[in-house]
Structures are given as C-alpha cells and as structure tokens.
Image (tube, rainbow, N blue to C red):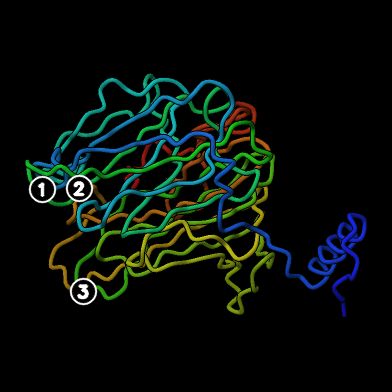
C-alpha cells in the first residue's frame, strides 16, 4: 500500500506523483475521457442565437450562421441555450466556405406531404452539409476529450450554420432567444473529431406494436476511427435506436459480447429516443476499422396510427437518425443512406483524402434522406 511521503521536496513530490499515476494505470482506474473542460483553454465563444418571435407558424425552421476567426482553432465544447418547451431541436453544420445565400426561415415542415418550401443547400456551391452537433429534449452541454475537437478556421470549416426547429408558433412579442454557444480553443487538436450520420427515407404501416427500420453502410476509408459518443433521434413513435456491427463479412467481439443467436451482428450501443437527445459518451473507446459494416435500427410503435406514417420533417412525420462522433488524424464526416441490403458505402461529406478513399455508393441517388 502506498504511503504519503513525509518530505515535501520537489524530487519526492514528483516521485510520488509518478507512483500514483503508475498505480492508477495498473488498477485500471485512469480516466479515458474528461467530463469537464479547462475554461482557461477556451479562447473564443461563438454565439449562434435566433429570435423566438420568428416562429409565426407551426414547424418553423430558422437559421443563423457565423464566420470562424482567422488561424487554426477547434471546438472544445457545446453549450445549448434552449428549452424543449420552445425548441424541438437544433442542428449544427460546418461549411468549408460560405453559407448558402438562399438559406432562410421556412415553415410547414419541409419535405412533408403538403409541407412548406424545401430548405435547399446549407453551404454555398455544394450539396454537402457536414453535421457537427445536435440538441433536443433539454440535453445538457457536451465536453470533448482533451486534445480532441472539430477543426474550424484556417485548418477546417470557415463557417458554422445552426438550424433551429420550432414545433409551435411563438408570440410575435417574444423577446427571448434560443441557440447554441460554441467554445473554441486556439491551435490544431491532436485528434480531429467528425460525425458519421445515419438517416434514410421510409414508410411505417399503421396499427403495428413494433416496426423496424434498418440502415446499413460499409466503412471503406483507409484509416481507423475511434468512436467517442452517439446521439439518436426519432419523433413520437420511436421506442429505441441502436447500432450493430458486422466486420469484413464476419462478426467481431471487440468491446462487445458475441451474440448467441449466430446472427453475426454485434450490438454496439443503443438509446431510447424519448430521453434527452444528448450525445452520450461511450464507456470505452470503440474502434471502427476499414471493412466494418454498421447497421442502425429504429424501433417504432404505430399502434395508435390509422394511416401510414412517412419519413419527414413535420411533427406528424417520423425520422430514424443516429449520429456517431468519431476522431482520427484527419476529419472524416460521412453519411449513411444505404437502406437495408448492406451493399452501400458511407458517402463522404468532408474529408481531406476523400477522392482517393471513396467511390459513390451504387444506390445513393435512390434514397430520400431526412436528417434531424
């Protein structure tokens, strides 16, 4: 058993600190991820706020954006400034250049049957919209691991765009605001954070206690990814969203327990979408390797519905989304809209070596994607 040293000399204190660190590693109690941030490392706070009075109709989507400061920076943590009684969800996107000049407030649900005007592109001159962060149901702030973050500024995204979705109309006299504070640190992180986003179109039959929607893609880029946290999203009918893995055509038991049913699918994570829609940190790092097939599954209960429920943006529609925060040496923002056959690859939204590491999925153009 270690004892407190009696001498206060610098050499003995350093020896004592080293002994404690070694003991922590041997006992398996050394922390893997931090749950707080050193505020002294936060150099800039970016405010992305919208006026609640802009929501004059149901299902109003509004946007605000900010240009990133010059130099190399990275996002260290996210601070939501919203309440679920007013805001349904918020999404944060990154743009390599400028924000699309056509982006403006829209109402009516977008893309839904009988809905309003489609959103269009988030970023100027490209259909790509790399997803960074999402909030819903009063989720708390999110702190990223030390020396890890989303690159912005000279070494990353030049602009950030926040989408704010109001389900209900707000008072025209409202003086309140909702949005997100994004906290930056100066420099280049040792590990670049990115997001893998799962989303696809579907139709749910009525009067069914359980309906499953699956979405499978193969990770085909060369570098491994380390998963840090995940977030799920559905509307009112969602009961569970979970992620499974099939590696290079065979099952794997890395960081998981091999299933006894012989399915070859290993469950990695899952969450009730009716809980606060936070990015839940994984208990231990999870490595995604080239050749891994990942399958997201959403479980719905349509027992109280008398007609089909479509995927869409309105509150009467549904969604099946899972977001996985990952980090590596370089950013790797990717999306999966592959369907259930497992033949599609993740589509690259933003990555320095995308041209050499990816070719378009064969059925990418046939899938209608709804991301929230």
The quadrant in which residue 252 appears is bottom right
Marks 3/1: CA distance?
29 Å
Choose between 213 and 100: the one closer to the eye. 100
- In the image, is residue 63 above or below residue 126? below
Would you say 251 lies left or right of 59 here?
right
Please tell me whether mark 3 or mark 1 is closer to you in this view: 1
* Quadrant, the N terminus: bottom right
How packed is label 1: few (under 14 Cα within 10 Å), some, or many (20 or more)? some
Residue at the image position 25 percent from the left and 22 percent from the top: 102
Measured from the top left, where is residue 191 in percent x and y?
Answer: 66, 41
Residue at the image position 17 percent from the left and 35 percent from the top: 106
Residue farthest toward the left in the current orientation of the protein: 172
Q: Name the residue under label 2.
A: 166
Res 345 visible: no
Going from N to C along the chain, the mark reached first, 2 or 3, is: 2
Q: Are marks 2 and 1 in contact (CB under 8 Å)?
A: yes
Residue at the image position 11 percent from the left and 47 percent from the top: 170
**Picture mark count:** 3
Q: Name the residue under label 1.
A: 169
Q: Are marks 2 and 3 in contact (CB under 8 Å)?
A: no
């Amino acid at each position: 058993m270690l004892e407190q040293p009696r001498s206060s000399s610098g050499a003995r204190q350093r020896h004592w600190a080293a002994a404690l660190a070694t003991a922590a590693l041997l006992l398996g109690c050394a922390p893997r991820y931090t749950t707080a941030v050193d505020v002294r490392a936060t150099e800039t706070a970016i405010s992305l706020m919208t006026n609640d009075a802009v929501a004059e109709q149901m299902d109003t989507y509004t946007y605000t954006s900010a240009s990133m400061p010059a130099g190399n920076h990275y996002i260290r943590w996210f601070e939501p400034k919203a309440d679920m009684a007013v805001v349904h969800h918020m999404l944060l996107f990154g743009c390599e250049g400028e924000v699309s000049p056509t982006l403006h407030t829209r109402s009516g649900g977008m893309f839904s049957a009988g809905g309003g005007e489609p959103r269009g592109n988030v970023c100027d001159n490209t259909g790509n919209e790399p997803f960074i962060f999402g909030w819903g149901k009063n989720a708390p702030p999110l702190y990223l691991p030390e020396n890890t973050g989303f690159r912005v500024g000279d070494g990353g995204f030049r602009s950030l765009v926040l989408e704010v979705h109001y389900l209900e109309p707000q008072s025209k006299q409202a003086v309140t605001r909702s949005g997100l504070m994004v906290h930056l640190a100066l420099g280049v992180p040792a590990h670049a954070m990115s997001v893998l986003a799962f989303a696809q179109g579907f139709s749910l039959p009525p009067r069914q206690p359980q309906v499953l929607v699956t979405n499978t893609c193969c990770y085909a880029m060369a570098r491994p990814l380390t998963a840090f946290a995940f977030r799920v999203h559905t509307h009112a009918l969602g009961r569970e969203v979970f992620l499974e893995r099939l590696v290079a055509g065979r099952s794997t038991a890395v960081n998981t327990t091999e299933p006894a049913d012989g399915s070859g699918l290993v469950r990695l994570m899952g969450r009730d979408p009716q809980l606060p829609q936070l990015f839940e940190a994984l208990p231990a790092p999870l490595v995604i390797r080239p050749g891994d097939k990942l399958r997201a599954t959403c479980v719905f209960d349509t027992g109280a519905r008398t007609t089909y429920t479509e995927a869409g943006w309105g509150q009467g529609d549904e969604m099946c989304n899972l977001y996985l925060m990952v980090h590596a040496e370089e950013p790797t923002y990717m999306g999966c809209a592959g369907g259930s056959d497992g033949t599609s690859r993740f589509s690259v939204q933003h990555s320095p070596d995308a041209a050499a590491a990816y070719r378009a999925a064969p059925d990418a153009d046939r899938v209608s994607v709804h991301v929230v």
